[in-house]
Image (cartoon, rainbow, N blue to C red):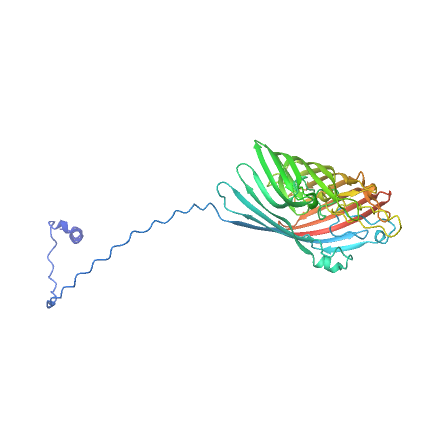
Amino acid sequence: MSKSTCLVTLLLFAATPALAQAPEPPPQPPAPEPPATPAPEPAPASTPAPAAEPAPPQKPAEAKPQLPAVVGKWEATLYGYVEADFIYDSTQGLNDLAANAGLARPNTYAGNHDQFTMGGRNSRLGFRLAAPSYNGIKTSAMLEMDFLGNQPAGQPFVNGVSEAAFILNPTFRFRHYNFKMETPYVDVLFGQYWQLFGWQSAFHPNTVDIQGVPGQIYSRSPQVRVSKKITAGDMSVDLAIAAVRPPQKASATPDGQAGIKLNYDKLKAWHTAGGSGSALDSASVGVSVVGRRFAVNEFSATPVNQVTRNGYGLSVDALIPVVPATKEHRENALTLTGDFVTGAGIADLYAGLTGGVQQPLLPAPAGGGAAPTYTPNIDNGLALFVPDGTLHPVQWTSFMVGAQYYLPPSGNFWVSGNYSHMHSGNANAFALAKNTPWDTSDWFDINLFCDVTPAVRFGLTFDRFAQTYVDKVDATNYRVQFSAWYLF
């Protein structure tokens, strides 16, 4: 047998005992056996352990009540912006929020001197809250505040308010405080929110100026609103009615407002409302109306009865994407905004509008002496008496048009411009010898915006304010404003 055959046979024998019958390899000398280990002595028998006691019977587990499934968790979103404003005016008297305040007449001290204002009162802080859905009802709330509140003692240099206090210690106020219930049938809103009149803020213009600007419907109020959105393909319709806080609580009747808005959801506009809020909005046209009742103390030093009159308003608004945009691409987008408003007793629906009208003086006593004082129970600018003792709501008609164009390549630079005109048909009836109302306003602005980052925005504007007083005197103010926003 060869050596290789013997080696293979040896390996198979070591690895596979089942091959024991195979030819054996040559005998090997036996290995020496180890010495035998003595067997251990047997252990003594142990005592048997006592039997274990049976375990007590276990009580069956109590069935736990079934809790309703958790649909979701509460959500809270913080939003707002920090704003810094730097404003030059060619005349004196306007605040950072110019609104519809009267301009200084020419050839007066305020009309012949300029001013410069710095501030941040328009900075804003808000929270959006959302609760889990319950039985198909979604609920949410909105809490939004800013620092444009009225100082308790008045405006700068009036009733002892210092300019420093007005600018550096502004009053913190709430803008929107409301909650909303969305059901499969209608949506209901409770609390302070935009007035339904004008479908705010869907049609607001793009401007660096603090809103509302001259001729712009801009107001919020406590209300109960019921609305419904109906969608059919690319079209949708918003319907809404609201009971709103009346401008005069003595009227004992809430304002009634209603509106309809048609939306073409396939055509989108890139729309910046004011200076801070940019969004992709549908092309839309809205119509809204307001009806209100005034109940004013009769024109007497010691009134006993009320004099009632009705006020009304109509607003037609439009948002038109001349060059549409998408969420990803807003470069070259061109958007137009516009509104037309007419009514009587609606001054409070604008910002800071009275036109300078005032209640007349009561006649002096026949025997001589000072004329008695009439104390009205209504805010100025809404409905006033004329000397013959009849009550008239103040009439206003206005329109505003605006355009905003987003430059290529990214749309982070854009330009906008707005023009408004307003006129009162009867403000001249409420002129006093010591006070002359204005009845016509023309305003325009040109704006340049830049988004430096998604959180930082700069804006620069040039404005021209013009008013014509009922004695045909024209007053003009030029404003240059630079503003910076940190958006969050």
| Camera sees residue 463 | yes
Q: Nearer the viewer, residue 68 or 116?
A: 68
Residue lying at 12% horizontally and 63% vertically, measured from the top left? 31
Residue 83, position as x, y percentages in the image: 67, 53
- The x and y percentages for residue 176 are 63, 48
In which quarter of the view is residue 269 placed? Answer: top right
Q: How many marks?
A: 0
Work out whether residue 174 or residue 45 is closer to the camera in this orientation and state it: 174
**Residue 221 found in image quarter:** top right
Q: Is residue 302 above or below residue 264?
A: below
Q: Name the side, left or right, on which 39 lies relative to 135.
A: left
Residue 171, located in which quarter of the rendered image?
bottom right
Lateral position of residue 29 relative to residue 55, left or right: left
Camera sees residue 332: no
Rendered location of residue 367, percent (x, y): 89, 50
The spot of residue 15 in percent (x, y) is: 18, 52
Q: Residue furthest top?
A: 232
